[in-house]
């Protein structure tokens, strides 16, 4: 059977919770809720109040990792201050998974480029995972969605360098580009292996710039909002988002498509499917 991706064109906090409930799956134990805290200065990231109904229902802990580049999130102190300024700590408990070392090393025996992934050691404190993704463009990956959150998002600061460098942290911005994209898929597979079937994915197609929420200076959104998607399959949900971008009737979509195609963004989806962590074929179920 094809994995189901639930989709609604209504973009509200309440719709996020409604779609989650459509899955009929409650995440067990201590739940890590992966978000993007938003780089200071970025105008497009999804604020904590948008996620609040779902996070309150889940009752988990907001988790993030530090960045591998200068800015407002590259040290634990700066990142926690960013969480405070952006309102996260007012609503939720927050855990920077790599606030303190050493990293947790996950094996990727079937990895095509990298055979290990470095994540914040606090990941070991959680039983299940909720991946909240803001779907948009990305300067290097072409687009960011569930697979990016699973890979770069959960990797420690060192792990981010390792993935970007396709196994050589010294090549942070200089590795072979397709090898970097495949490394993201490899890293994502280590997280799906770690949590098994105890992961839920939410992608929100709103405020879609060609730039990531990690950019302090980002372009404004270039395409009309499309909707919210929820699934148990990270490949299916990202593929569905790509398909919705291509099929929408917004005449400005070419700018986002150019960003995705110029970075060969679909390769991450293809590589993840090759690794068996999800399916590019899916059933899209539209919900009012």
Image (cartoon, helix red, strand yellow):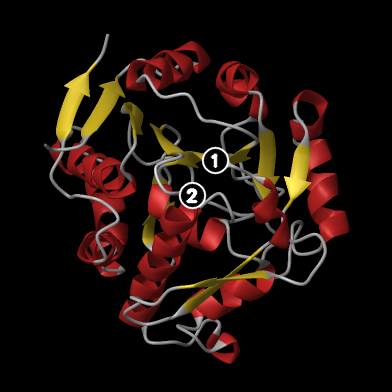
> In the image, which disc is placed on residue 224?
none
> In the image, which disc is placed on residue 195?
2
Q: Secondary structure at mark 2?
A: helix
Give x and y (percent) for residue 97.
72, 55
| Residue at (28% x, 50% y) in the render | 235
Neighbours of disc 1 within 10 Å: few (<14), some (14-19), many (20+): many
Where 13 sits versus 116, above or below? above
Q: Nearer the viewer, residue 213 or 94?
A: 94
* For marks 1 and 2 on the same chain, the one whose residue lies earlier in the sequence: 1
Where 201 sits versus 20, above or below? below
| Residue at (49% x, 11% y) in the render | 14
Give x and y (percent) for residue 172.
56, 82
CA separation in Å, label 1 and label 2: 6 Å
- Quadrant hosting residue 48: top right
Q: Is residue 144 visible?
A: no
Question: Tag count in the figure?
Answer: 2
Q: Is residue 243 left or right of residue 288?
A: left
Q: Quadrant of the N terminus?
A: top left
Where is mark 1, residue-wise?
Answer: 128
Where 189 sits versus 25, above or below? below
Residue at the top extreme, as displayed:
288
| Residue at (44% x, 80% y) in the render | 115
Q: Nearer the viewer, residue 264 or 54?
A: 54
- Quadrant hosting residue 223: top left
Residues at circles 1 and 2 in contact by the CB criterion of under 8 Å:
yes
Q: Is residue 119 left or right of residue 250?
A: right
Q: Secondary structure at mark 1?
A: strand
Where 194 sits versus 130, above or below? below
Give x and y (percent) for residue 158.
66, 75
Neighbours of disc 2 within 10 Å: few (<14), some (14-19), many (20+): few
Q: Quadrant of the C terminus?
A: top left
Give x and y (percent) for residue 196.
42, 48
């Amino acid at each position: 059977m094809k994995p189901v991706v639930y989709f609604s064109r209504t973009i509200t906090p309440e719709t996020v919770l409604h779609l989650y409930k459509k899955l009929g799956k409650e995440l067990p134990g201590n739940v890590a809720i992966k978000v993007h805290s938003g780089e200071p200065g970025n105008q497009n990231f999804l604020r904590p109040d948008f996620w609040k109904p779902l996070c309150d229902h889940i009752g988990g802990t907001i988790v993030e990792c530090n960045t591998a580049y200068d800015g407002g999130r590259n040290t634990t102190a700066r990142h926690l201050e960013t969480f405070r300024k952006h309102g996260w700590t007012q609503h939720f408990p927050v855990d920077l998974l790599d606030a303190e070392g050493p990293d947790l090393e996950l094996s990727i025996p079937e990895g095509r480029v990298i055979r290990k992934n470095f994540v914040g050691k606090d990941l070991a404190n959680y039983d299940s995972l909720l991946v909240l993704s803001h779907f948009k463009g990305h300067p290097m990956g072409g687009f960011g969605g569930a697979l990016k959150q699973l890979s770069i998002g959960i990797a420690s600061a060192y792990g981010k360098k390792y993935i970007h460098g396709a196994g050589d942290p010294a090549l942070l911005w200089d590795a072979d580009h397709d090898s970097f994209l495949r490394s993201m898929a490899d890293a994502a597979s280590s997280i799906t292996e770690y949590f098994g079937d105890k992961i839920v994915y939410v992608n929100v197609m709103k405020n879609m710039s060609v730039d990531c929420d990690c950019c302090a200076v980002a372009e404004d959104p270039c395409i009309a909002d499309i909707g919210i998607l929820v699934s148990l399959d990270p490949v299916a949900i990202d593929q569905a988002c790509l398909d919705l971008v291509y099929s929408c009737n917004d005449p400005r979509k070419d700018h986002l498509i150019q960003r995705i195609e110029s970075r060969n963004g679909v390769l991450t989806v293809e590589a993840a499917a090759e690794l068996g962590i999800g399916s590019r074929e899916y059933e899209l179920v539209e919900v009012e």
